[in-house]
Image: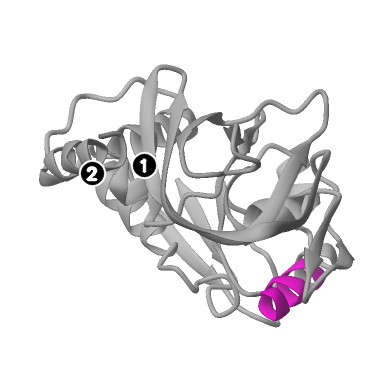
Amino acid sequence: MKIALLYPELLGTYGDGGNVLALVERSVRRGIEASVSEVHHGDEVPEADLYVLGGGEDGPQRMAADLLRASSFASRVSDGARVLAICAGLQILGTSFCVEGDDEYQGLGMVECVTRRGSSRSVGNLGTEVHGDRLVGFENHGGVTELGADLRPLGRVLHGRGNDGSVDGFVTDSIWATYAHGPVLALNPWFCDEIIAVLANRELDELATVADELYRRRCDVVFA
């Protein structure tokens, strides 16, 4: 399994690089080989099974969008690679997003969604129902994201705002996207395993770790 962390110096504000650590650790413990490449400004985007995009501020987000637009990233995803996108990364994949006030900036257009500035910033715990499971995280963004008619949300918001107060993120055959920081895969071991199972194309054995108890405790707080 090849994992590429894209532009952590631009999209690494909220510790989202920890998603890569969770993926590797939970894979290796099951005997699944996993390697990680960090892609920085000026680097070629390598071949990978999964690309990870984190969150970032307006200026770095715009720079990351420009770098990705000029790279082979979109074509590699079209050829079968998958993506985990968090917050700013989620917005970049869409048609357009707002930066630095209400200035509209072109996204990569890989999915049909538009992010505009909300009337207030969303900061705090985020809780989402994802096909019967509970996803927890922390959101810190000023955007409101509208999904196209054919784009499925990742889940239904039970606490916080996510995209618009009703749903969070989106999911396609090749992309998982959410506003949940934390990092989300370290906070939600079941979600991490779901992604690993898809990438490895196999059912996973149960893996009991301290992450399970920490997840339950955070759910008690967020969904109280």
Amino acid type of the residue that numbered disc 2 sits on in the rendered structure: Arg
Q: Is residue 5 left or right of residue 88?
A: left
Tell me where residue 43 sits by quadrant: bottom right
- Disc 2 is placed on an element classified as helix
* Rendered view: 32 above or below 190: below
How far across and how far down the image is residue 10, in percent?
60, 77
Image quarter of the C terminus: top left
Image quarter of the N terminus: top left
Residue under pointer 1 = 136
Amino acid type of the residue that numbered disc 1 sits on in the rendered structure: Val
The residue nearer to you, when weighing 17 against 103, is 103
Q: Is residue 133 left or right of residue 102?
A: left
Query: Residue 60 lies in magenta, yes or no?
Result: yes
Q: Residue at x 26, y 51 (%)?
A: 25
* Magenta region, residue range: 58-66
Q: Say the numbered circle drawn on residue 75.
A: none
* Rendered view: 224 above or below 11: above
The residue nearer to you, when weighing 173 against 166, is 166
* Rendered view: 48 above or below 193: below
Tell me where residue 29 sits by quadrant: top left
Colour mapping used in the image: one colour
Q: Residue at x 55, y 80 (%)?
A: 9
Tell me whether circle 2 and circle 1 mark residues in contact (CB < 8 Å): yes
Q: Residues within 10 Å of mark 1 (few under 14, many from 20)?
A: many
Residues at marks 2 and 1, CA–CA distance in whole angstroms: 7 Å
Q: Residue furthest top?
A: 132
Magenta segment, principal secondary structure?
helix
- Disc 1 is placed on an element classified as strand
Residue under pointer 2 = 218
Q: Residue at x 76, y 73 (%)?
A: 62
Q: Is residue 61 left or right of residue 113?
A: left
Q: Residues within 10 Å of mark 2 (few under 14, many from 20)?
A: some
